[in-house]
Image: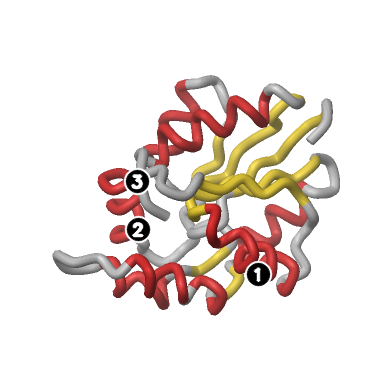
Amino acid sequence: MSDQSFAVFDIDGVLADVSHRLHHLTGRRKHWGRFFAAAEADTLLDRGRHLLMDAAQAHAIVYLSGRPERLRRVTQRWLDRHDLPTGALLLRPNGDHRPARLLKLELMGSVAAHGSVAFVVDDDVEVCRALRSAGFTVHQATWAPDAAPMRDAQEREGRS
């Protein structure tokens, strides 16, 4: 990353449709291994893709995801397979189980240290609220199928 203008995109629920794997997060026992193992089969959300492609015309792209670092290769292959713009990929450190709002707020600080942030796109209400409170321009993605189990997991268990 260099001194420039960034457009920051979450992946799950903004670009990737995770609805096919949410059943692993319902019920008392969450099956995180199965949930993450199915990430490669996510389909691309058209509204997110269109917004990303438009943003890439004017800004450097940063992908900011609550996915664990161990999914870096899977995530990069997914981005490449869908011909999405090249950009920095910031992921949750393995073993970090803080709520997504805290994790992403911290990671946004490192993005902002390298240039101006034009805007952030995320689907998580708590993440959007935290980033707005910190002064970032945030667009909340509302186009993904209901991902309540994932949002709950992000906030309560610091996963995804």
Looking at this view, name the residue that lies furthest to the left: 28
Q: Residues within 10 Å of mark 2 (few under 14, many from 20)?
A: many
Q: How crowded is mark 3: few (under 14 residues within 10 Å), some or many (20 or more)?
A: many
Q: Which colour scheme is used?
A: secondary structure
Q: Distance between the residues labelled 2 and 1?
A: 19 Å
Q: Distance between the residues labelled 1 and 3?
A: 23 Å
Q: In this view, does 94 lie to the left or right of 75?
A: left
Where does the image place residue 53, in percent across and percent down from the top left?
A: 76, 56
SS of the residue under disc 1: helix
Residue type indicated by callout 3: Gly
Q: Residue at x 84, y 41 (%)?
A: 58
Q: Name the quadrant of the C terminus.
A: bottom left
Is the Cβ of the residue at disc 1 closer than 8 Å to that at disc 3?
A: no
Residue that label 3 marks: 158
Q: How crowded is mark 1: few (under 14 residues within 10 Å), some or many (20 or more)?
A: some
Residue that label 2 marks: 150
Q: Is residue 18 left or right of residue 29?
A: right
Depth check, front residue: 76 or 143: 76
Residue type indicated by callout 2: Met
Q: Name the quadrant of the N terminus.
A: top right
Residue that label 1 marks: 78
Where does the image place residue 132, in percent across and percent down from the top left?
A: 49, 27
Q: Which residue is drawn at 18% across and 67% down?
A: 29
SS of the residue under disc 2: helix
Q: Eyeballing the image, is 125 above or below 109?
A: below
Q: Eyeballing the image, is 134 above or below 117?
A: above
Q: Eyeballing the image, is 109 above or below 49?
A: above
Q: Which residue is drawn at 30% across and 53% down?
A: 153
